[in-house]
Amino acid sequence: MYATWDDHEVRNDFAGSTEPLMPVGRQAFIDYWPIQPPAEEPGRLYRRVRWGKLLELFVLDTRQYRSDNRQPDGPRKTMLGSVQRRWLVDGVSSSDAVWKVVVSSVTLSVPTGRSGRDSWSYANVWGFPEANATGFAMERDAILQALRTRKVKNLLWVTADVHHAEVIRHHPWPDFAFHEFIAGPLSASRGRPRPLDMALNPRSLFALGDADNFGQVTIDPAGLAVRIFDASGTMRFEHTIRPD
């Protein structure tokens, strides 16, 4: 089990850079889950896990380094902080695993948040990007552009937070595409699919709302399969991706 935190370990939609309770919530998380941060960085939660030749997993910390959500999006606004962002880009682009999987507790393409956008997207509720909006889309797009420039293949993101399941193919540039998998909740209020951020040129392959659910990803040399199950154990969707 590889756990990461999101906002409710501390406060709804919190930003670690401005939240005084962040260190307490972080320590409780580290005490509860089987995580051993490096001695030189006792609060570090982002990490990478190699699983043979086929998979490398990059687990992000989208909370303790982030700028305040209410700030307008711009080149200085960050969700990851400069060190983690460089670690992510360098690690994914240099990985020789067939599949590179990035785990983000918040979605790339579903706008969330009330007083300020809490996910990467700065789109409005209809999916249209807005000028002078909040969000972290400039950092998101810079990361994706860097991975595109370095010709990363077989990239997918596993995300959560929105309380529905969805499998999405993003194609922001003609020569660069990747998938985003969303699943959950297992036990929380149920959400519904909503318009996706058009800046990523998304195509929803499947969406399931108003249902407790979980996702499963299996990988073998032939490809990667994603499945969505409901609480009864019934498989509601299956999709296989062949490696480039």
Image (cartoon, rainbow, N blue to C red):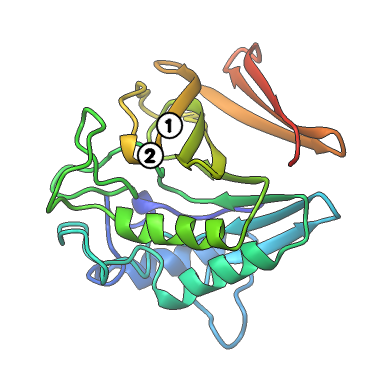
Which residue in the rendered view is the most extreme toward the front?
Answer: 174
Q: Is residue 41 above or below residue 148?
A: below
Tell me if mark 1 has few (under 14), some (14-19) or many (20+) residues whose alpha carbon lies within 10 angstroms of its own.
many
**Residue 103 position in % (x across, y down):** 55, 50
Picture coordinates of residue 150 (x, y %)?
A: 60, 63
Label 1 vs 2, first from the N-terminus: 2
At x 79%, y 34%, the residue is: 223
Residue 78 is drawn in which quadrant? bottom left
Q: Quadrant of residue 139?
A: bottom left
Dot 2 corresponds to which residue?
109
Q: Is residue 106 visible?
A: yes
Residue at left offset 28%, top offset 67%: 21
The amino acid on which the numbered mark 1 sits, given as a three-letter code, is: Pro
Q: Secondary structure at mark 1?
A: strand
Q: Residue at x 55, y 72 (%)?
A: 87
| Furthest residue toward bottom | 40
Specify the quadrant of the image occupied by residue 82.
Answer: bottom left
Q: Are marks 1 and 2 in contact (CB under 8 Å)?
A: yes
Asked whether 174 or 223 is in front, the reply is: 174
Q: What residue is pinned by disc 1? A: 202
Disc sitting over residue 143 in the figure: none
Q: Residue flagged by tag 2: what amino acid is it?
A: Ser
Q: How far apart in space, not on screen, are marks 1 and 2 (Cα)?
A: 8 Å
Q: Position of residue 18 (x, y in %)?
A: 22, 70
